[in-house]
Image (tube, grey):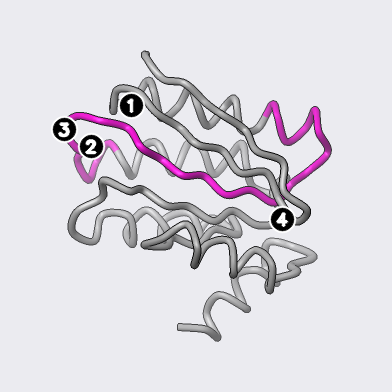
């Protein structure tokens, strides 16, 4: 589990920039750190910019991580924007669907700029509200 997290406080959210080695342990580890920091700072709107290096995770690994993570994040976060700068294919879209189906207010973006714009515009009050707004924009 080799990863580093840099946190930038923004007016509307916390921006987490994650670097290091890609792998299930790194992803689970930084997600726990996100949860701890949100709780400590009382800020529940986040942008995760993942810059992990190495082979991409498989579909089953992603499903397992998102399913387990959803249990921890559901009801805690108001909004999560997620950017994987090394993503290929539609695996991140799959991850978004898994999380949204578990009532986690998340959207995946291709760029940090698009994610920041969504966080500035979206003012969800609950997970359901964030999901409804995300669906309308598609």
Tell me where residue 75 appears, x and y as whole percent.
72, 49
How far apart are the alpha carbons under marks 3 and 1? Answer: 11 Å
Q: Quadrant of the N terminus?
A: top left
Residue projecting furthest to the top: 1
Residue at (72% x, 55% y) in the render: 78
Q: Are marks 4 and 2 in contact (CB under 8 Å)?
A: no
Query: Badge 3, how many Cα within 10 Å: few under 14, some, many 20+?
Result: few
Query: Badge 4, how many Cα within 10 Å: few under 14, some, many 20+?
Result: many
- In primary-sequence order, the first of circles 4 and 2 is 2
- In primary-sequence order, the first of circles 2 and 1 is 1
How far apart are the alpha carbons under marks 4 and 3? Answer: 31 Å
Image check: 12 left or right of 64? right
Label 3: state its secondary structure: loop
Q: Are marks 2 and 3 in contact (CB under 8 Å)?
A: yes
Image check: 138 left or right of 132? left
Tell me where residue 21 appears, x and y as whole percent.
29, 22
Residue at (78% x, 53% y) in the render: 11
Residue occupied by mark 1:
24
| Region rendered in magenta | 36-61
Residue occupied by mark 4:
78
Mark carried by residue 55:
3
Q: Are marks 2 and 1 in contact (CB under 8 Å)?
A: yes
Q: Quadrant of residue 89?
A: bottom left
Residue occupied by mark 2:
57
């Amino acid at each position: 589990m080799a990863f580093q997290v840099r946190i930038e406080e923004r007016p509307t959210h916390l921006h987490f920039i994650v670097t290091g080695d890609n792998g299930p342990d790194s992803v689970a580890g930084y997600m726990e750190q996100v949860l701890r920091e949100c709780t400590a700072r009382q800020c529940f709107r986040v942008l995760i910019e993942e810059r992990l290096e190495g082979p991409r995770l498989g579909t089953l690994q992603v499903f397992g991580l998102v399913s387990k993570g959803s249990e921890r994040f559901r009801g805690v976060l108001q909004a999560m924007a997620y950017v994987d700068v090394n993503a290929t294919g539609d695996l991140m879209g799959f991850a978004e669907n898994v999380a949204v189906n578990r009532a986690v207010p998340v959207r995946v973006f291709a760029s940090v700029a698009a994610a920041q714009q969504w966080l500035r515009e979206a003012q969800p009050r609950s997970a359901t509200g964030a999901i409804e707004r995300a669906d309308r924009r598609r």
